[in-house]
Image: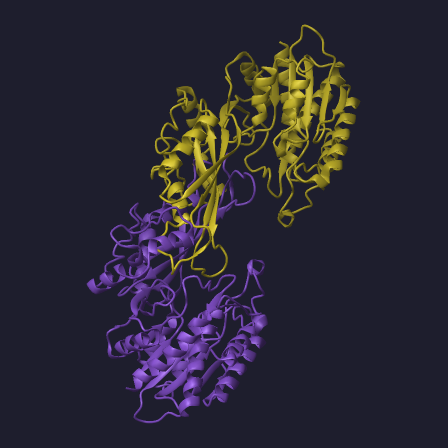
Chain colours: A yellow, B purple
C-alpha cells in the first residue's frame, strides 16, 4: 500500500460530511471539491454537479466508442457520529490500529469508493487510460435517501449511458471472502393511529365501559403474526418468489455460522423467525412485518390510572421478489381494518417505500464479476442476498436500464452507522484489485 | 346561604394547596393554619398535627361519655391546576357563575369538607354543642396517596375512637339526587418490561431472525382479554362476589341514563365492555385490566427502521369484592410468563395497590345515613358503588375498626382534576343539611 493512498484516505475521512445535519452543508461541498481535485489529478474529467441538496461528483475518462462503459457509484456523505462519548477516538480524526482505520465513514462509504478511485489512479498511471469507459458518480445524499440522484440520472441519461453499474457499499460475509450480493429486500412503511375517547379518561371512573385504545392497538399489532412467526395478513405471501434450489444450497454451505454470529451480535438468548426457513433465508429471502415503534398513554415514572385517548405504532414491511409495496400496504390496511376492535377509530398512513432488487449473478456481467472477484481474492466469490434495502439500484435499472454489481467490502464488524466505525487497509487493497479486475473482465 | 359562608369558601379556595408539587409546601401549611383558626373560632378544639409530609388538621368538640362519636374526614390539598390555558378564570381566584363556584378544589374536596364545617358552625351557634362527639380530620396528602394518614390514625387510635366515619368525597349520580356510595373498587398496579437484543437492531439486517420485543409486548397485552371484553387470566374472576339481586335491580332503576351520559362524556362512538353486564355493573362491580401506558422503539416523526431492544407497559387492575390484590397480581404474572414469546426477557414489577371497599348500606349506621339523606334532600337516597378507589376508607376499617359512610356531593360535571373545576352553592347548602341530619340521626 502506497503511503499516498493512506494519506488520501485520511484526508477524505477528515471531512465531517454529515448529510443529515444542515449545519454541515459547507463541509459536504468541501469534500466534493476535494474529490473533484483528486479525480482531476489522476487524469479524469471531473466536476461538481449542483443539486437542490448536496452536490454530486461526476468524473469520467475519455469515452471511446466500441468499448464497454461502466458506472461506478458511491457516496461521500456519512452518518452522524453520535453518540460521541462511545468513540474511542474522535470520529473525524482517523487513526490506524492493527491494520484497521477508525473513523466515521471509513467503511460507509469512503473507504470502499476510494478504493475504486485508487484502482483507477494506478491504472491511469500505468497505462494512461482505463480498459473501458468509466463514469464515476459519488453523491452526497445517500444517508438521507438519495433524494436528488434520480433527477441527476434522468437529466444526464444519455451522457451516463452505460452497460453496467458497479457499487461497493454492501457486506462481505467474512474477512477475506469475496462476496457478491445479487438481491436486496425492499421496504414499505405504514403508520397506525387508533383513537377512542375524546380525552384521557380516569380508569376508575370509566374502566370497564369503554374500549381502551392501547388494548386495541395491542390487539392489532398482535394480529400480524401467528406464534410460528408467520405473517397472518391474507395474501401477504402470494407473490413471494420461492427461493431457488441453488440459492438454498449455496447459502447452507457458506463458510460462516450465521446463527452463532447473530446470537453474538444481538445478544438474544435464542433466534426466532418464520418456521421452515433457515436464518439466512429469513433475513435475505423472506418478507417481514416489523413494529418499529409504538406508544400510548402514560410512559413516565410511577403509575397514572388513565385510559389514554390514543395510541400509535410504526410498521415497516421488508419486501422480497416479487412483492409489490403498494399491494402489500393495501393488504395490511385491509387486515388491520378487519381486526380493529369496536368503537375505535383507526387511521393508517403509508410512508416511504422502496422496491426489492434481484439480479442474475450468472448473467454475462454477473459471471464477469465472479471471475474478477476470484482474480482479486484468489478464491471463489460467494453469492448472497442482503436483508436491507438500497433504493438507488432500482433507479439505475429504471432510469439507465442497467443492472448493478454489488461487490461489497464491508466486514460484519465494521460498525457502519455506529461508534468506532472502521475499515481494514487490506480491504482498501482488495478494492483496488477488484476495480482493476472488473475493468479488465469488462474489457475482454 | 350566609354571606360569611361564601366568604369562607372563597378564602379556603384561594390557597394553592397543591400537594403534588413540593414548591407549594408552605401554602399547604398556611391553608392548614387557616382551617385551625376557623375551627377554633366556631368552638372546636383544633390543632395542626405535623407529619413527615403535609400536616393534618384535627379538631373535635368536647367528647362526652354516653354519646356516639363520628369522625368526619376530608382533605385540603388539591390537584395541580394544569393545563392552565384551559381555565376560563384563574384556578385560585374563585368566581361565581350561575350558582357554581369555579376554582381548583371547589368540589375536590374543599367545598365538600367545608360544608360539614359550616354545618358544625351553625349547630354550635344554635346549641353551643353538637348532638354527638365529633372528630374532624382534614389531611393535606389525599391527592398524593395519603401516605402519612395511616400513621396518624395508628398513633392516635385511642383518641380517635369512634363509631363511624363520614366522608363527602364521592359523587352524586345527578343534581338533586342524594347518593350513598357503599362500595369502591380497589386497584393493583403491575409494570412490564420486555427485553430482546442488547441494542436496537437494523430491521433490514436482522429483521426476520429475532423476536421483536414490541411484537412480544403486543402479544402479551393482547392476551389479557378475549374479544368479548372478558379477562383471560386463569382464576381472575374466582373470588368475585356476584352482584346481589337488589343491587342489580336498584341500579337498573336509577334516574339516570348511564349509556347516554358516558357516550357524551367520553365521545366514543359506542361503549364496550364485558359481555353480560350493564354499563354500571361493568364500572361499579366488575374488575378490569387496563393498559395505562405502553411504549417502545421509535415514536418520533417519520420512519426509523429499527427493532427496538425493549418495550414497556403499565397495567392496573381494578379489583372488586372479594378479590385480593396480591393474588390477582400473582395470577397476572403467571399468565404473562406463560404467554411470553420465546427469547424475550420479561420483568414484572408490582406497583401500588389499594383494596376495594364494601359496606352494608342497610346496617344500623347505613340506615341512619339513608334517613339523614332523605331529610336533607326530601327525597330517597340512591345506593351505588363507585368505580374508583379511596384507599383511606380501608384504613379507617383496619386501624379504627369502623365503617365509612360515603355521602357524596360531587356532580358528574364537576370537573374534579380538570380545568374549570366547580361546585354548586346548592351543594354547599346540601352538605350543611347533611351534616346536621346525620349528626341528629346518630344522636337518636
Residue A326 vs A45, above or below: the answer is: below
Q: Residue at x 54, y 82 (%)?
A: B34
Residue B104 vs A245, above or below: the answer is: below
Quadrant of image for the N terminus of chain A: top right
- Left/right placement of residue B360 relative to residue A230 reads left
Q: Is residue B142 visible?
A: no
Q: Nearer the viewer, residue B95 or A6?
A: B95
Residue A41 drawn at (x, y percent): 79, 23
Residue A412 vs A168, above or below: the answer is: below
- Left/right placement of residue B217 relative to residue A417 reads left
Total numbered badges shown on the rendered structure: 0
Q: Nearer the viewer, residue A427 or A139?
A: A139
* Identity of the residue furthest to the left in this view: B245
Residue B329 drawn at (x, y percent): 33, 60
Q: Nearer the viewer, residue A365 or B119?
A: B119
- Left/right placement of residue A93 relative to residue A344 reads right
Q: Is residue B283 visible?
A: yes
Q: Quadrant of residue B113?
A: bottom left
- Left/right placement of residue B240 relative to residue A176 reads left
Residue B184 drawn at (x, y percent): 33, 66
Quadrant of image for the C terminus of chain A: top right
Residue B351 drawn at (x, y percent): 41, 63
Amino acid at each position: 500500500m502506497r503511503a499516498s493512498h493512506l494519506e488520501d484516505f485520511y484526508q477524505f475521512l477528515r471531512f465531517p460530511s454529515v448529510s443529515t445535519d444542515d449545519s454541515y452543508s459547507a463541509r459536504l461541498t468541501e469534500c466534493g471539491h476535494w474529490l473533484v481535485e483528486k479525480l482531476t489529478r489522476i487524469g479524469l474529467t471531473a466536476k461538481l454537479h449542483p443539486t437542490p441538496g448536496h452536490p454530486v461528483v461526476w468524473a469520467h475518462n475519455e469515452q471511446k466508442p466500441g468499448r464497454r462503459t461502466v458506472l461506478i457509484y458511491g457516496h461521500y456523505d456519512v452518518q452522524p457520529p453520535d453518540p460521541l462519548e462511545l468513540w474511542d477516538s474522535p470520529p473525524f480524526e482517523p487513526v490506524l490500529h492493527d491494520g484497521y482505520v477508525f473513523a466515521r465513514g471509513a467503511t460507509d462509504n469512503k473507504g470502499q469508493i476510494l478504493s475504486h478511485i485508487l484502482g483507477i489512479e494506478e491504472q491511469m498511471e500505468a497505462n494512461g487510460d482505463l480498459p473501458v469507459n468509466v463514469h464515476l458518480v459519488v453523491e452526497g445524499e445517500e444517508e438521507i435517501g438519495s433524494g436528488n440522484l434520480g433527477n441527476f440520472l434522468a437529466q444526464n441519461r444519455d451522457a451516463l449511458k452505460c452497460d453496467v453499474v458497479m457499487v461497493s457499499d454492501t457486506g462481505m460475509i467474512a474477512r477475506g471472502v469475496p462476496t457478491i450480493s445479487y438481491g436486496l429486500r425492499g421496504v414499505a412503511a405504514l403508520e397506525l393511529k387508533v383513537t377512542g375517547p375524546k380525552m384521557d379518561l380516569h380508569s376508575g371512573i370509566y374502566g370497564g365501559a369503554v374500549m381502551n385504545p392501547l388494548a386495541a392497538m395491542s390487539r392489532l399489532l398482535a394480529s400480524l403474526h401467528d406464534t410460528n412467526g408467520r405473517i397472518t395478513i391474507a395474501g401477504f405471501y402470494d407473490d413471494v418468489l420461492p427461493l431457488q434450489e441453488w440459492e438454498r444450497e449455496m447459502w447452507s454451505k457458506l463458510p460462516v455460522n450465521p446463527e452463532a454470529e447473530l446470537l453474538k451480535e444481538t445478544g438474544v438468548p435464542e433466534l426466532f423467525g418464520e418456521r421452515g426457513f433457515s436464518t439466512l433465508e429469513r433475513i435475505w429471502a423472506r418478507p417481514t412485518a416489523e413494529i418499529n415503534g409504538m406508544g400510548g398513554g402514560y410512559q413516565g415514572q410511577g403509575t397514572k390510572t388513565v385510559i389514554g385517548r390514543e395510541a400509535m405504532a410504526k410498521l415497516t414491511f421488508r419486501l422480497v421478489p416479487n412483492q409489490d409495496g403498494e399491494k402489500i400496504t393495501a393488504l395490511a390496511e385491509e387486515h388491520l381494518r378487519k381486526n380493529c376492535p369496536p368503537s375505535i377509530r383507526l387511521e393508517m398512513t403509508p410512508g416511504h417505500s422502496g422496491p426489492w432488487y434481484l439480479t442474475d449473478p450468472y448473467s454475462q456481467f454477473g459471471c464477469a464479476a465472479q471471475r474478477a472477484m476470484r482474480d482479486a481474492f484468489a478464491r471463489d466469490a460467494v453469492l448472497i442476498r442482503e436483508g436491507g434495502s438500497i433504493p438507488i439500484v432500482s433507479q439505475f435499472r429504471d432510469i439507465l436500464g442497467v443492472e448493478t454489481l454489488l461487490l461489497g467490502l464491508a466486514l460484519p464488524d465494521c460498525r457502519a452507522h455506529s461508534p468506532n466505525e472502521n475499515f481494514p487497509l487490506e480491504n482498501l487493497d482488495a478494492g483496488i484489485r477488484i476495480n482493476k479486475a472488473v475493468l479488465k473482465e469488462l474489457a475482454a
